[in-house]
Amino acid sequence: MTTRQESTERSATGRRLLVSCVIGMLAAAVGLWAASSLVWTRQRYRTPFSGDDVARVTGEALRPELAPLALATLAAIAAVLATGGLLRRVIGLVIVLEAVLLGWRLFDWLVGPAGVSEVPGSPPGSRPLEVREVLPYAPALMGASALVLLLCGAAVLFAARRMPAMGSKYSAPAEARETRDPDRRLWEDLDEGRDPTEAGDGDENG
């Protein structure tokens, strides 16, 4: 009875961990998409016709990989749910590598030039000048998404076997059918502390 309770608790823990990872990865995908759409900097540029102007530079221009990685994260969610075992561990490793890549790209932007060499939407012949303002919200969102992906990827990598797969619920009836063997059922009843003779009488009456 204790073994069955431990198995049930272990299964519930794995289910909660899987749900937490799915929710975290979904939030990270939304965060990456938002970071791609939000304004990161305001940069001054000079046009050959109307003089100086200020452009709002979004994450799509500064880090064009954000939107594709958001889509890749959504695909990884489906892969984590559909797979198990070694393949799920591989997917967890890919998620960790995605988080490391995002962290590196954010660090590279922080220590490198904040502006762009070609201002999006500016007239032909325009010359980019200095960055007037850096807005911290979108980079912080990118960093938070990378951290969440790192935690979720590590959880999938190291706890893949504890998490249920989508097909696991279909394996239970097959296992139940296997236990219909009388000899095997007898030993299972004895192991679980039940009286096999009572079960047999119930079957005969049925």
Image (cartoon, rainbow, N blue to C red):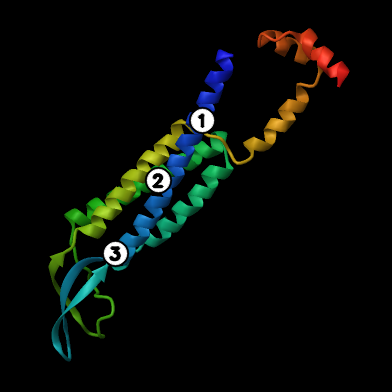
Q: Report whether residue 94 is seen.
A: no
Amino acid type for the residue under numbered disc 2: Gly
Q: Which numbered disc, 3 or 2, marks the residue closer to the eye? A: 2
Quarter of the image holding residue 196? top right
**In which quadrant is the C terminus drawn?**
top right
Residue 23, percent across and down?
A: 43, 46
Q: Quickly name the residue at label 2.
A: 24
Q: Which numbered disc, 1 or 2, marks the residue closer to the eye? A: 1
Q: Quickly name the residue at label 3.
A: 59
* Residue at x-position 38% and y-position 57%: 30
Amino acid type for the residue under numbered disc 1: Ala
- On residue 12, the disc is 1
For label 3, count other residues whose C-alpha is less than 10 Å away and answer few (under 14), some (14-19) or many (20+): many
Instruction: Name the foreground residue: 183 vs 65.
Output: 183
* Residue at x-position 28% and y-position 76%: 120
Quarter of the image holding residue 7? top right
Assess whether mark 1 and mark 3 are in contact (beta carbons under 8 angstroms): no
Cα separation between marks 3 and 2: 21 Å
Instruction: Name the foreground residue: 203 vs 161.
Output: 203
Left/right placement of residue 140 relative to residue 91 reads left
* Residue at x-position 55% and y-position 24%: 8
